[in-house]
Amino acid sequence: MGWRGRSSARPAGRGSTERFRGVSQSTDSSADSHIHVDEGEVLTILGPNGAGKTVLLRTLLGLLPYHGKIWWRRNVEIGYVPQRLPFIRDFPLTVKEFLSLKGVPESEIHEVFSSLRIADPNILSKKMGVLSSGQFQRILIAYALLGSPDVLLFDEPTAGIDLGAEETIYTLLSKLKKEKNITILLVTHDLAVVYQFASRCLCINRRMLCFGAPRKIDETVLSKLYGGEVKIYEYHH
């Protein structure tokens, strides 16, 4: 599956919303769709495995061809946290060497570490391959934050990490939204994240099935999205 067509991404005026019109996997899948994301919003992207969520993020980054048009704000800076970077663990890079690939001064690295609450004084000298899953994900987020991006794209940032680290990652995302007013596009399977963090939600399964406020994502929508009966349970703790 791919997003076919010729890339025609272009900037919109400063202060405008980010807009994605008719970005589709095929000529007829979502040709009439129109998605816009306002500055400072969190857009969650929900869908089953193989729905095209990662493909959509890579398309928005200009890495894949597509049908339709994409408008980004003029001079927008985008950070990207992919779902997996397993090959990085196999390279004999220290954390400092990996982050230095971004070409920023070490002082900025320390500033980002402070915002992410990375307190280990020796972490810069550690090899990427020895980090825990939670530490590794924080370093990927730190890399994305270097250069002060306006928009962050997260592809399931908590995949493969333990529950404690997962809760910390989402706390960090909430903190970034509040303190830096960063626009976030977040791929997730977690409905709790959708209801707690999202400004809007996009549901896709090879085509757009819904786009709007999280409160509109009910059992009927989810059943269409995942192809079976879905029940939503609320709990408080």
Image (cartoon, rainbow, N blue to C red):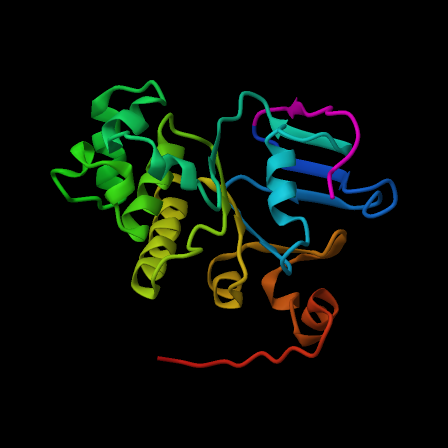
Q: Is residue 222 above or below residue 64?
A: below
Q: Is residue 82 left or right of residue 73?
A: left
Q: How many marks?
A: 0
Residue 98 in picture, x, y percent from top left = 31, 28
Report the front residue among 15 and 173: 173
**Which residue: 27% across, 35% down?**
112
Q: Is residue 17 visible?
A: no
Observer-nearest of 144 and 95: 95
The residue that appears at 29% across and 41% down in the rendered structure is: 129
Residue 130 in magenta?
no
Is residue 171 toward the left or the right of residue 10 in the image? left
- Label the magenta part by its dominant secondary structure: loop
Query: On the rendered structure, is 138 left or right of 7?
Result: left
Q: Residue at x 66, y 42 (%)?
A: 36
Place of residue 64 in the rendered image (x, y in percent of width and height, measured from the top left): 67, 31
The C terminus appears in which quarter of the rendering? bottom left
What is the x, y in percent for residue 229?
A: 69, 79
Residue 2 on the magenta segment: yes
User: Where is 193 relative to 68, above or below?
Assistant: below
* Residue 7 % position (x, y): 73, 25
Looking at this view, name the residue that lies furthest to the left.
Answer: 121
Q: Residue furthest right?
A: 28
Q: Which residues, given as a range, are shown in magenta? A: 1-14
From this viewpoint, is residue 18 visible?
Answer: yes
Where 98 falls versus 85 (above or below)?
above
Q: Residue at x 38, y 25 (%)?
A: 147
Left or right of 221 in this view: 91? left
Location of the N terminus (image quadrant): top right
Name the image quarter holding residue 227.
Answer: bottom right
